[in-house]
Amino acid sequence: MGSVNSRNGKLYIDFRYQGVRCREQTALPDTQVNQRKIQKLLKQLEADMRLGCFVYSEYFPQSNKAASFAKQDREAQKNKQALLGNYKTALQELQGIETILFEDFAQEWFDENSVRWKQSYQDSMKVYLWSYLVPHFGEYEVGRISRPDILKYRASLVKPRDDGKVLSAEFINHVMTPLRMILAEAADRYEFRSTFENIKPLRVERRNVNPFDLDEVNRFLSAVRSDYKNYFTTRFFTGMRTSEIDGLKWKYVDLKRRLISIRETHVQGRQETTKTTRSTRDILISSVVLKALESQWQVSGDKEFVFCNAAGKPLDKGNIRDRIWKPTLERLGMPYRRPYETRHTAATLWLAAGEAPEWIAHQMGHTTTKMLFDVYSRYVPNLTRQDGSAFEKLLGQSMNTEDNS
């Protein structure tokens, strides 16, 4: 058995190989953390020796002793090549590892769960796993990822990257979600306690919404290209998400009953199911939207999609944003706002008109009215110019009734 020792405040490894005593100095200071690192290295080194896969020059490329083991290194390289995929498993067993590496378990977890995910969600998970988590935690034994390991990794994501870009708190939370889920599943299978417990997500600053008022909507619709007026009229007065209106098919539009049925979406070039179960809903068609859809029927009634290009395919949201949306705002001298603000506009206009919050939540595809009051209520006074006058009017009516009695 080898040992880890200290000399002049630096750690070194003392072991025997091929009957030769070997001492290899490291540049690591003698601390508990570094001792654990070197102990782990020693454990792997000894396992490699027992497998016949110990390549001295790979462990200690700067060592003067490496040259004297050149012949043994060549044989060890051959043994590693012969073992191929079995090498990793055999090494784990010799090291006494009772669970598997994070990379292997992450792949297993993804394969088991991806069958129930939408393709767009699968694509996102692939990014989180193989662009972020696996490159960092891949060689960790899944049962030995500590709470400090998790927190330090998250802290590293917060720092600006080499290109100066900074990941948002929301995106970092998305990256950490599969890590939490993987560790929870591994803990259940291998009977250890997950170290992700009680780690709260990063605080995400609420994005400010910037809806149009009714005058701005009318100005926009008057200025936008005529072949897109029906499209934006429908967006402004139904509150549909971009993916919902881009994936809208005529079979889901009932002009007689004045209903739009949200059943499919168009995401990343594919037709998919709705974002959530609640998002599957029927939207009431107002008179202005009815007129727009009747006009659109004359244009694309023989096509599958309500709003489509010349080939009958769904519109490209990036193309619409850059070629139609932005130029229209610029011509009007309006500051830039995301096309998604059309959805927020519908909500604020309905609230300003006094529609029932429950009805608005249904139109929007929200589970409760909470989001309406959290996000949109502050716009209602600005739109209605009432600021409590409705209550004053009620009090006035009550006082007049008492005076007349």
Image (tube, rainbow, N blue to C red):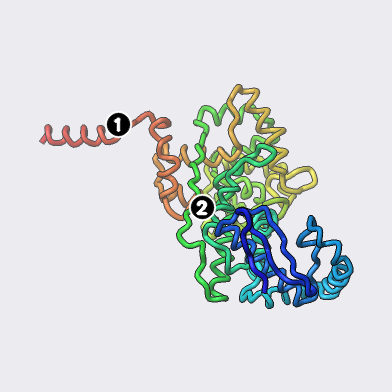
Q: Mark 1, residues whose alpha carbon is within 10 Å: few (<14), some, or many (≥20)? A: few
Give the residue type that dot 1 points to.
Ser
In the foreground, 3 or 243: 3
Percent x, y for residue 196? 51, 62
Residue 87 figure quarter: bottom right
- For residue 365, which numbered disc appears in the image? 2
- The alpha-carbon separation of the residues under discs 1 and 2 comes to 30 Å
Give the residue type that dot 2 points to.
Gly
x 64%, y 62%: residue: 38
The vertical placement of 93 against 275, above or below, is below
Could you tell whether 1 is left or right of 376 in the image? right
Mark 2 element type = loop
Which residue position is annotated with label 1?
389
In the foreground, 178 or 296: 178
Percent x, y for residue 269? 73, 51
Contact, CB < 8 Å: mark 1 with mark 2? no
Residue 242 figure quarter: top right
Do we see residue 334 in this rendering? yes
Position of the N terminus by quadrant: bottom right
Q: How many numbered marks have been drawn onto this rendered protein structure?
A: 2
Do we see residue 115 in this rendering? no
Mark 1 and mark 2 lie on one chain; the one further toward the N terminus is: 2
x 17%, y 32%: residue: 400
Percent x, y for residue 371? 44, 47
Mark 1 element type = helix
x 77%, y 76%: residue: 51
The vertical placement of 114 against 280, above or below, is below
- For residue 361, which numbered disc appears in the image? none
Could you tell whether 191 is left or right of 123 in the image? left
Could you tell whether 224 is left or right of 257 in the image? right
Percent x, y for residue 209? 51, 37
